[in-house]
Image: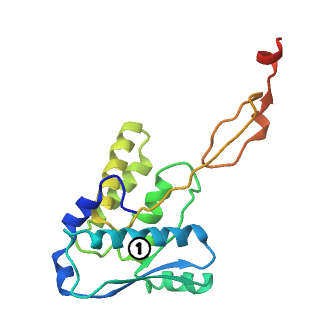
Amino acid sequence: MVHNGLLDLVVQVLPDILANMSYKLEIYYNSGNVNREKACLLLKDGITKVLADPGATQPSQSLEIDVVPLEWSNYLYQVRHRQLPIFFLGWAPDYADPDNYVGPFVKSTGTFPARVGLAGSEGWNATKVDGWIDQAAQSQDENVRKDLYYKIQEAIVDHVAYIWVYQATSFHVESVYMNGYVFNPMHGPYFYHYYKDFSPFYGT
């Protein structure tokens, strides 16, 4: 979980208040989802490594971290009713535009800001960020949209409302004779554009 030399930085920003408290941290995922289980374990491992660092602020008692599976129906219920302190979820876009991410995850009227308490959290300017989201959705200028989405992303990352853990990867193998493949993260292979070309190997 703690990669690319970030351990020292995390240790430096570990809150001093941690020295005067002890608590149990539970990280939830829906049972049977192997990827989310692994992500939870990565997070647990990352926190453990931070606290194991000699320069880290330590809680007054050992921090207990548990990874807890829940049945899907129970998981959904508790997520919707804001009963889980840390939980994992995934997202696949419905359409190829950043709006399909910032709408559900960042805008105050979105699904998840209410579930994680973003809109009313201290230091979060929902009016300003919502305005950026609306402007980005309406603008047809690519440069304007790029600048706005940069501001939105910077705001949500700085606020640490979410922990971005992993992103899916795609693996594609094909014969040297195949042509026409175009990677599309929104969809599977589009076979209508595939064709074979043997001419480089056998002549025209």
- The answer to whether residue 95 is left or right of residue 175 is left
Residue at x 51% of width, y 49% of height: 97
- The answer to whether residue 189 is left or right of residue 93 is right
Q: Is residue 83 above or below residue 142?
A: below
Q: Quadrant of residue 74?
A: bottom right
Residue 144 visible, this orientation: yes
Q: From the top left corner, tell me how far across and down residue 186 is, in percent.
A: 62, 49
Disc 1 designates what residue? 44
Residue at x 33% of width, y 57% of height: 131
Residue at x 37% of width, y 51% of height: 135
Q: From the top left corner, tell me how far across and down residue 151 is, in percent.
A: 30, 51
Query: Which amino acid, mark 1?
Result: Lys
Q: From the top left corner, tell me how far across and down residue 139 is, in percent.
A: 41, 44
Residue at x 21% of width, y 80% of height: 18
Farthest residue toward the top?
204
Q: From the top left corner, tell me how far across and down residue 118 is, in percent.
A: 34, 72
The residue nearer to you, when weighing 177 against 148, is 177
Q: Quadrant of residue 7?
A: bottom left
Local crowd size for mark 1, using a 10 Å CA cut-off: few (<14), some (14–19), many (≥20):
some
Image quadrant in which the N terminus is located: bottom left
Image quadrant in which the C terminus is located: top right
Q: Is residue 14 above or below residue 66?
A: above
- Secondary structure at badge 1 equals helix
Residue 109 visible, this orientation: no
Q: Is residue 79 above or below residue 95?
A: below
The residue nearer to you, when weighing 110 against 34, is 34
